[in-house]
Amino acid sequence: MFKKITILIIVCFTINACTLSRTLIHNKPSIKDGKHFSKVILSKAVKASQPFIQQPNSPLPPVKQWTRHQRLKSNQSLETYLKKTNTTDFIVLRNDTNLYENYFNGNDANSQDIGFSITKTFITSLLAIAIEEGHIKGVNQKIGDFIPSYATGKRKNMTINDVLQMTSGLNYGDYSKKMWQLAKTYYTPKLKDLVDEADLAHEPNTHFAYKSIDTQILGFCIENAVGKTISEYLNEKIWQPLGMENDALFTLDQKNGNERMYGGLGIGSRDLMRFAKLYLNKGKWNGQQIIPEKWVTSIYHRNMSEITTPNAKWWGYNKGWWLETYLNGNLNEQKDFYAAGYNGQLLYINPEANVIILRRGHNKGGVNWQIALGNLAELLHTGDNYQLEEEVVAKNNLIQQHIFEGKYRKKGGKKLVQLKRKANEWLFETDNGKTCTPLARHCPQSLYSDSKFTRIIFQIENNQVVGLYVDDFQNLTYFEKIE
């Protein structure tokens, strides 16, 4: 109790009265927050596009096959599972055909729910367009060219690329323990002041840390470059060209204020699917190139030579999208990616399977949705069943789990580590036994430790494990298998 009171006192002294009152009144962010904030409306298209073939819902693979690593009752129906995991919207599209679309827990197709950080992918898309149109010279242009407070001082070398890739070095972090920072970012009525006053924790382009303030800075740069608000530019370049069927809302920090560009877009699920299809089609819509193709294809490219050398950029995040998905093949062969928002909002795209899956909800419901949806896409594409206990499937070949065990040596170094199987748990330890990390199966080709925030990803060639990557969601380190 004393700890909670202390935290509350710190919060009170750190954030201003308006921000504090909003925090206390609304408390935890909700997908229904559109009603709590001032907003601008993006009007639906005069004529909605019809990019998908509508049909009655088709049977999907049994839930236990694609969420087998989750706790669920045997033979539980999809609808029951989605309801119990607090899902509100669930849509599965394959080959331009709507295989499944359903709404739960009070939602329908017209619900303008907040997408939280899915909003970031709209902002980064507008950046690509602004660069293509010549408003911005490129990702290496300085932030100070658009925001005067960044033109001098320690932040003067910060570039567009730094805020695009979350390597700005600013003293923020959405996953840090500084909960007052998140409250301040989410509820502040003065986003421009927040941006102007942000200080550095690291030199730009030296450290990855996911933080919403970076996208807010990016949005302000776009506005100043194009001479329009982000809502106006979004409406002109994406909303109307894609023929969106519903109005959208963009929440503001205050009346007649600034769009909350890091996570304030309220949008219907079918329109989110249109946006995903734009990316599935490499940025093209009805023959028109909306987003440059090179920009889209660069998002899901895993360049392992870049990943394994010192680099501020983390491999699993690129231009507002996430890459650390379900893995049933080597890391550098993956091409799927997803946009994610707070409490389990997830828009998943798999170009090879030609699949788009959208899941939205009041919270995650205890599910690791990027793994589950990636698994579902794999099932729809190949029919392979994720085997959890005795064997895994990799490219239609059965690989015995014991071949993961053994000793590994850091590439180019002497450091040795060992991977052992103990009952249903895996133990990853240094050769001298001083550090031991317990891990559980994450998907067929990776293990994960919740407590250590570490993922191990196996590299397989000719049905043999030749090495593994240790991923701490900051850096990726490769170890060769030696025995």
Image (spheres, grey):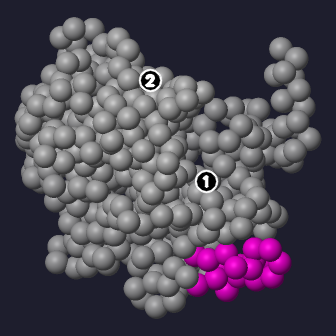
User: What residue appears at the point 80 percent right and 38 percent down from the top-left corner?
Assistant: 21
> What amino acid is found at the position of numbered circle 2 in the picture?
Leu
The magenta stretch spans residue 69 = no
Q: Quadrant of the N terminus?
A: top right
Residue 368 % position (x, y): 39, 31
- Image position of 1 with respect to 59: above or below: above
Residue 354 % position (x, y): 15, 53
Identify the secondary structure beneath mark 2: strand
- Image position of 86 with respect to 256: above or below: above
- Image position of 378 with respect to 125: above or below: above
Q: Which residues are magenta?
A: 141-160
Residue 35 % position (x, y): 58, 42
Q: Quadrant of residue 385?
A: top left
User: What residue appears at the point 40 percent right and 85 percent down from the top-left corner?
Assistant: 132
Q: Give the numbered dot on residue 209.
A: 1
CA neighbours of label 2 inside 10 A, class few (<14), some (14 to 19), many (20+): some
Q: Quadrant of the C terminus?
A: top left
The residue identified by callout 2 is 427
